[in-house]
Image: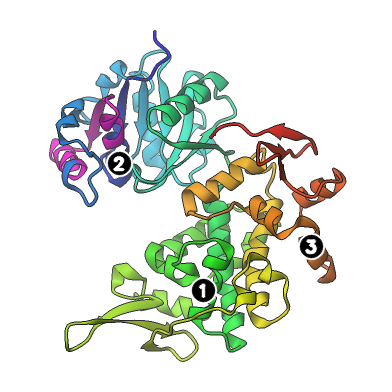
């Protein structure tokens, strides 16, 4: 049997399933797309062709996709090199489908479960050894054809050749940046990104008490630190406050004891009230921000003032020069204090998660750049600030130095990357070649 992946079964025609199926068909793979009913499968194909944006750029390549149902056509997975399960984020649903597909697939086929945070060990618990050896998590980011990041997570029994085979296909044929994560809650990108957002809401609450406004906080959490212009509140509006509440509850249940993120799994009071009245973000017509039509047909942007509980016109903010640089967080004014607590706290969090969520700094940095559009990953930010300066600030506040910063100090080095990024400092205190992503 050829090692090359040429045929793919996608089980589930939702947002992620259609995105994966469309991308594979665009790259000339034979795709079997199965959904609960033929009507659902046909609607999924229509979304692949006509969605906004379409998952398939070349309409003629829809001929690469064959439709079927999970009830009547599951045995056809025997003809597929890669079986990608992409049903709803429900553990029992995924386990039930895995139990059904395992005896039907051929030896040597690769199986993946597409999930944003369900541990692989829970999905495969007490499953046959053959499945456990051939399965990985593939966490694609939405929209699949646009977002570069693909987090790949093996189980304890997964054969290295399976990870290499699927990773090679996803890099070369699908054009993905493959990040190797471990089987921990929310993997890499969402673990760190959600910490930044949830902790940021709490630190922002304190900053608003210091007479900073919401627009300034979003300005500080965008260009100066190399994040997208949505900032903190704007990003949560895009995601939805209900989704962030679900994420927080999941983290509260699954984060290990002593994890710094446990302190931020619940919303501050103002956000709790917003959630209760359905003020969720863009999906509900407004969250922290909204766009209103004027009588003349023009539009204006409004901000929900969290302290006053009222809508007002959104302010235009221009940061002064000292607050437009990444190292402004080392200062001591209100702006710097917010940036230090929010972004500085996130950098500390990331530096304490190796080797728990990843074996190296490279995969962490790539996950945040490719999945969250950060200009620099956490360790690249630390290099830009200067790790020694960052540690000096920590010690001046009597705060502990995180694990990887200790490794850096013990190695008598001053940067996580050297030689233009071609080498990185490992958790063993030794520099290693940076592999392609």
Q: Quick one: SS at disc 1?
A: helix
Residue found 47% across the figure and 76% down from its top: 271
Query: Does the magenta portion include 32?
Result: yes
Q: Quick one: SS at disc 2?
A: helix
Q: Is residue 187 visible?
A: no
Disc on the earlier residue, 3 or 1: 1
Q: Quick one: SS at disc 3?
A: helix
Query: Does the magenta portion include 229?
Result: no
Q: Which mark is residue 389?
A: 3
- The residue under label 2 is 19
Please provide percent x and percent y for residue 29. Answer: 28, 24
Residue found 67% across the figure and 39% down from its top: 360
Please provide percent x and percent y for residue 429. Answer: 80, 39
- The span picked out in magenta is 22-48
Please provide percent x and percent y for residue 127. Answer: 48, 26
Residue found 40% across the figure and 66% down from its top: 242
Q: Is residue 234 visible?
A: yes
Q: Name the residue furthest top.
A: 1
In the figure, 101 relative to 384: above or below? above
Q: Which mark is residue 267?
A: none
Crowd rating for badge 2 (residues with CA inside 10 Å; few <14, some 14–19, many 20+): many
Specify the quadrant of the image occupied by residue 224.
bottom right
Q: Nearer the viewer, residue 109 or 71?
A: 109
In 3D space, how far apart are the residues under numbered discs 2 and 3 (Cα atoms)? 44 Å
């Amino acid at each position: 049997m050829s090692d090359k992946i040429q045929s793919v079964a996608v089980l589930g025609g939702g947002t992620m399933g259609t995105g994966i199926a469309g991308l594979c068909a665009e790259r000339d793979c034979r795709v079997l797309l199965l959904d609960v009913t033929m009507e659902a499968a046909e609607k999924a194909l229509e979304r692949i062709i006509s969605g906004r944006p379409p998952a398939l750029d070349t309409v003629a390549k829809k001929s690469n996709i064959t439709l079927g149902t999970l009830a009547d056509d599951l045995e056809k997975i025997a003809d597929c090199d890669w079986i990608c399960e992409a049903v709803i984020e429900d553990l029992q649903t995924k386990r039930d489908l895995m139990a059904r597909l395992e005896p039907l697939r051929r030896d040597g086929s690769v199986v993946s479960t597409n999930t944003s945070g369900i541990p692989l060990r829970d999905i495969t618990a007490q499953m046959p050894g053959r499945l456990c050896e051939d399965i990985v998590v593939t966490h694609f980011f939405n929209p699949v054809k646009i977002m570069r990041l693909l987090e790949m997570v093996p189980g304890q029994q997964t054969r290295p050749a399976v990870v290499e085979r699927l990773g090679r296909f996803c890099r070369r044929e699908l054009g993905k940046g493959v990040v190797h994560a471990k089987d921990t809650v929310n993997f890499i990108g969402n673990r760190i990104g959600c910490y930044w957002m949830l902790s940021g809401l709490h630190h922002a609450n304190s900053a608003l008490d210091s007479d900073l406004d919401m627009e300034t906080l979003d300005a500080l959490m965008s260009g100066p630190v190399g994040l997208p212009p949505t900032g903190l509140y704007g990003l949560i509006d895009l995601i939805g406050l209900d989704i962030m509440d679900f994420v927080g509850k999941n983290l509260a249940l699954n984060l290990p004891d002593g994890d710094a993120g446990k302190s931020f799994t619940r919303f501050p009071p103002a956000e709790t009230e917003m959630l209760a009245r359905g003020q969720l973000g863009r999906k509900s017509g407004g969250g922290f921000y909204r766009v209103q039509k004027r009588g003349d047909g023009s539009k204006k942007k409004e901000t929900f003032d969290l302290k006053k509980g009222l809508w007002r016109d959104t302010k235009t903010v221009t940061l002064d020069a000292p607050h437009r640089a990444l190292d402004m967080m080392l200062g001591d004014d209100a702006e710097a204090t917010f940036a230090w607590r929010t972004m500085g706290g996130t950098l500390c969090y990331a530096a304490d998660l190796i080797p728990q969520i990843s074996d190296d700094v490279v995969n962490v940095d790539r996950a945040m750049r490719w999945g969250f559009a950060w200009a620099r990953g956490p360790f690249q930010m630390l290099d830009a600030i200067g790790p020694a300066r960052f540690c000096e600030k920590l010690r001046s506040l009597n705060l502990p130095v995180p694990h990887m910063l200790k490794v850096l100090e013990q190695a008598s080095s001053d940067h996580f990357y050297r030689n233009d990024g071609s080498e990185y400092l490992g958790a063993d205190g030794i520099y290693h070649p940076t592999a392609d992503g």
